[in-house]
Image (cartoon, rainbow, N blue to C red):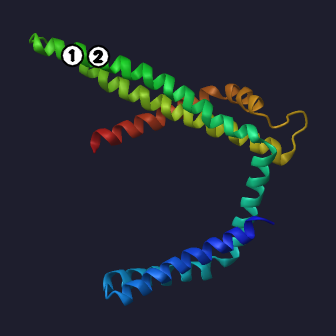
Amino acid sequence: MFPKPMVYFMIVLSMGTIAALALLGLFTANLGLAISMGVTFLIYGLLLCCLWKKLHTGIAMISVATKFMSDKPTVFLSPIVKLILTTIVGFFYVFALSATVAVSNHKQNLGQDSAVEDGFIGLYALFFLVFMFLFYYMMTYTISVMCANWYYGIQGSQGSLFNGYKMMFQQFGSLVFASLIISVVTFARMLVQ
């Protein structure tokens, strides 16, 4: 019952703020502000009219998500685990990258070829992306498993975080492969740009 008044209040507050900014633009003779906020108000109003029936679906989803998070507060530990793993790997990669750059600079100062070290720098960036995507998908997978077990009431699994991690390690190869593919594509896009 709680999300419905909150959602309606947020709609009224945002529409009121946009209308107030449009009026402020009119009163201060700032036509740019008045016109842009007026158009924004009209677009917002049209979207609300078109999507009004979908709003109730969104409210129902918010209430289910709220109930899940209050029933399973351990779901908040999954991002903390991701943060800890990311920090550990980040420190390792910063140390390894700085050592590689130092060796590359030393070789350049001596007039030697440092192409191998420069290649390792790109490889470090690629593997850093692999681990960041992997940790993200590990977090997403464990939260999804917890939510599915809770929602469908699967017998014998209380939808715990430990159960999510246990199931994740059964699918770990797929997560690593997906992370590698996404990292390679992201790395290629970064090189092109």
- Quickly name the residue at label 2: 100
Q: Quadrant of the N terminus?
A: bottom right
102 is higher (above) or lower (below) than 179: above
Residue 114: percent from left, percent from top: 19, 16
How many residues crowd around disc 1 within 10 Å: few (fewer than 14), some, or many (20 or more)? many
Residue shown at the point (74%, 37%) measured from the top left: 74
- Along the viewing direction, whichever of 10 and 178 lies nearer the viewer: 10
77 is higher (above) or lower (below) than 60: above
How many residues crowd around disc 2 within 10 Å: few (fewer than 14), some, or many (20 or more)? many
Q: Quadrant of the C terminus?
A: top left
Whether residue 15 sits left or right of residue 192 in the image: it is: right
Measured in 3D between alpha carbons, the distance from the residue under mark 1 to the one under mark 2, in whole angstroms, is 6 Å
Residue shown at the point (44%, 26%) measured from the top left: 90
Residue 168: percent from left, percent from top: 68, 30
Pointers 1 and 2 in contact (C-beta within 8 Å)? yes
- Along the viewing direction, whichever of 89 and 26 lies nearer the viewer: 26
Q: Which mark is residue 104?
A: 1
106 is higher (above) or lower (below) than 41: above
Give the secondary structure at mark 2.
helix
Residue shown at the point (24%, 16%) measured from the top left: 102
Whether residue 25 sits left or right of residue 144 in the image: it is: left
Kind of residue at badge 1 = Ser
Residue 21: percent from left, percent from top: 44, 80
Kind of residue at badge 2 = Thr
Residue 30: percent from left, percent from top: 31, 84
Q: Which mark is residue 3?
A: none
- Along the viewing direction, whichever of 75 and 177 lies nearer the viewer: 75
- Based on the displayed image, in which of its 4 quarters is residue 178 positioned? top right
- Based on the displayed image, in which of its 4 quarters is residue 46 positioned? bottom right
- Based on the displayed image, in which of its 4 quarters is residue 111 positioned? top left
Give the secondary structure at mark 1.
helix
